[in-house]
Amino acid sequence: MLAFVAALLLSIYFTTVGQLEAESDAAADGEFASLERVYSEGGMRELSQQTIARTAREGSMLYVLAESSGAVVAGDFQQLPSQPGDAAERLDFRFERPDEEGRIVRKRARGRVGRLLGGPILLVARDMSDDEAIADRITRALWTVAVLGLLLSVASGLIASWFASRRVETIANAALDVMAGDLTRRAPVRSDGDEFDGLAETINAMLDRIEQLMQATRSAGDAIAHDLRSPLTRFRQRLEAALEAPPNVEADREALRKAAEEADRLLEMFAGVLKLARVEASGNWTLQRIDATAILKDLAEFYEPAAEERQLGFQSSVEEGLTLRGEAGLFAQAASNLIENAMKYTPSGGRIEVRAWLRPDGRMEFNVLDDGPGIAPAERDRVLERFVRLEGARTSPGAGLGLSLVSAVARLHRGGLHLRDGLDAGGRRGLGAALVLPAEARP
Amino acid sequence: MRVLIVEDDADVAATLKASLTADEHEVDLAVDGELGENMALNGAYDVIVLDRMLPKKLGVSVVRDLRQQGVSTPVLILSALHDEDHRVEGLNAGANDYLGKPFSTRELLARVRALWHGRGREPQTRLQVGDLEMDLLARVVKRGGKKLDLQPREFRLLEYLMRHAGQTVTRKMLLENVWDYHFDPQTNVIDVHISRLRAKIDRDFSQSLLHTVRGSGYRLEV
């Protein structure tokens, strides 16, 4: 950088000096030519007069007129700085002069020297010291500006990179703390909204997601451990009891059958966990335009006979033309989970209503309402978590994943699952499950 | 019937072989995709049971290449990944059925037999089991000459049972093939549909055609 600036300045200096020299050479040449003309028209007399007159003039031009022997006739110097050849030639020389305070100063001059026709020697030169001073001044000014500019830019660069590395460091520190195990740590965001804030916000959003996933994994792990321990224990006890009892084909076969059922329940639970995990990792699914009306009508038709068999009143009203962007299999499973939930928890003699319609806000709402015992408002959020089965539900089959799966499917479809009161039935509040999903515009 | 099992997990393969042998099938075993494909090309098998994740060559590629080489033996793909995408991918490659792990032995046996019976069958316009007749074009069902009034879904359910007459059909097979549902209902909803159908085809007749196979599913036969 410095070298570049130095080279630039040197080239400016030499260009300037070169320019000035060229101008001064042109002036000296002009003056030489004009005196040559005086000589050719008026001879030696006229030339020496003119030389004396021009020497007396204020200015930077210097003159010397000498005889062919080199003896000076008139001019600024007592003798010629050099003996010229026959042809006129360019001359660059130094000479000494007292300045205003009487000190001797070495100066530089450039000009032309030559023999005129018949022998006399004429020298016309220009004092270069003023020009050199100008070039020096320009160069010095440029130097100052360049050095100042350089210092300024280096300083501001240092400051900027110091700030940048400070910001990066705070973000990196936050990441390191998270790596060390503090999942609640976040990168600080200042309010000026620069790129670093953008970066910090993105990283924080990522950390939020990681924390959620970690918590979900952790609680799922705890819940799996908790829920699997008792069926596995039962499983083992049953096998042990069968082994210890005296051999009896009938009893042994019964024990095996129960064990197989228990194993099925465990496998079903695992399958549920895996499915839920896959739904929550939403990248695995391709959403397409699906005919929600057809899917829901088929489901209602599918479940109606089973509901009637349980002596449950079953009513369905599904609006025509409901379409959405979704995954047909998951949507059907989510809707079926809600219907099955209602069938499981509504005592016989009760009612179930299934409705679906397009709301004015462009979302479709699917409701399954029952007049069963319902869920107390305080418990409603909790039942959406994995494996949560409320007391009293322990006796009915199911892994406790049904509503969490519906909720995950709703999120995958950019919608939500809401639990409310259902159908009023003399004191019982019932349960109303509402799946609200963005609908596709009607064609 | 000769069955080829292509499965790299030795335990699963041994269990499958034992179950199929007990069901009086002749069973060969291949431990990777390439070997399985060669055996399928060179042996006369009635059904191939193919794991999806296999060393050397994936099950889906094996099916695709077999079909390209003109082998039309029915293929059942077994997979731990029981998801819609993989199921569709397997069926598109030319598999005839797709079963997610874990599965019950009965489910597998029922499907293997259904594949064997279904192979190379001409498209039919009439089905008959005893005195029960189905006209697929006119969409009319008669028993003993008397016309039965069936809902569209009941018609499809009966059609599937009649096409697999004499074989055990599991609830899962009915769910997948009649309703196209790929989840397991927690309620006995299939049984209710079957009992409604039974009321229509069997109630007024002395001989029952639709039988319950305890622990497995249903069978339609004389």
Image (tube, rainbow, N blue to C red):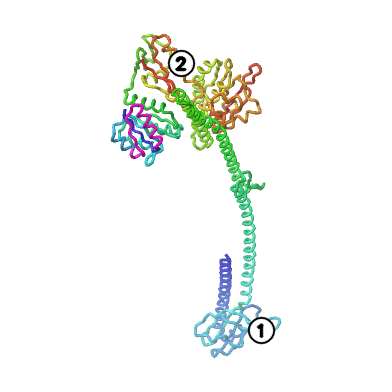
Marks 1 and 2: CB-CB under 8 Å?
Answer: no
- Label for residue A165? none
Q: Amino acid at mark 1?
A: Ile
Does the rendering let one see residue A384? Answer: yes
At 61% from the left and 55% from the top, the residue drawn is: A165
Give the label, 1 or 2, closer to the camera. Answer: 2
Residue A438, how many percent across, how many down?
56, 30
Taking the view exactly as shown, the residue that stands out farthest to the front is A246
Q: Main secondary structure of the magenta part?
A: helix
Residue B218, how many percent across, how many down?
41, 20
- Label for residue A104? 1
Q: Secondary structure at mark 2?
A: helix
Residue indicated by mark 2: B195
User: Which chain is home to disc 2?
Assistant: B
Horizontal side, residue A182 vs residue A443: left or right: right
Foreground of the two, B137 or A147: B137
Residue A118, how many percent across, how many down?
51, 87
Q: Secondary structure at mark 1?
A: strand
Foreground of the two, A54 or A151: A151
